[in-house]
Amino acid sequence: MLILTRRPGESLYLGDNIRITILGMQGKQVKIGLDVPGDMVVYREEVYRRVMEENRMALETSNADLLAATQIWHDKTKE
């Protein structure tokens, strides 16, 4: 992990088109501003982890799912 020290009003860049600016500090909280391209998605970590877990679960195929799909296909071919 790269650790940098910045003061309020100072920025850093990730690549050529992402700027992170320290807007202020209050107690243990740091307020940051992000300038990112409009087509880039930004998530808070806890939301990102939840999205990734839901995506992983959606990709899992259970035996029950396969049996149900087989039964539906079998029923359709009899019609």
Image (cartoon, rainbow, N blue to C red):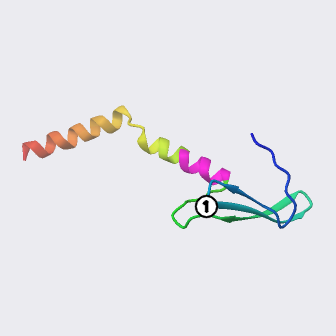
Along the viewing direction, whichever of 31 and 63 lies nearer the viewer: 31
The magenta span reads 45-52
Q: Residue at x 85, y 57 (%)?
A: 6
Residue ranking furthest to the right: 27
| x, y percent for residue 77 | 10, 43
Q: Residue at x 54, y 44 (%)?
A: 53
Along the viewing direction, whichever of 8 and 51 lies nearer the viewer: 8
Q: Residue at x 22, y 37 (%)?
A: 70
Magenta stretch holds residue 46: yes
Residue ranking furthest to the top: 63
Q: Residue at x 76, y 42 (%)?
A: 2
Residue 48 placement, left or right of 24:
left
Residue 5 placement, left or right of 62:
right
Question: Does residue 46 sit above or below 66 in this rendering?
Answer: below
Quarter of the image where one finds residue 47: bottom right
| x, y percent for residue 63 | 35, 32
- The secondary structure type at the circle numbered 1 is loop
Quadrant of the snapshot with the N terminus: top right
Q: Residues within 10 Å of mark 1 (few under 14, many from 20)?
A: few
| x, y percent for residue 65 | 33, 39
Q: How many marks?
A: 1
Magenta stretch holds residue 27: no
| x, y percent for residue 41 | 56, 59
Question: What secondary structure prevails in the magenta region?
Answer: helix
Residue 28 placement, left or right of 12:
right
Question: Does residue 57 sit above or below 45 in this rendering?
Answer: above
* Three-letter amino acid code of the residue under disc 1: Asn
Q: Which residue is mark 1?
A: 17
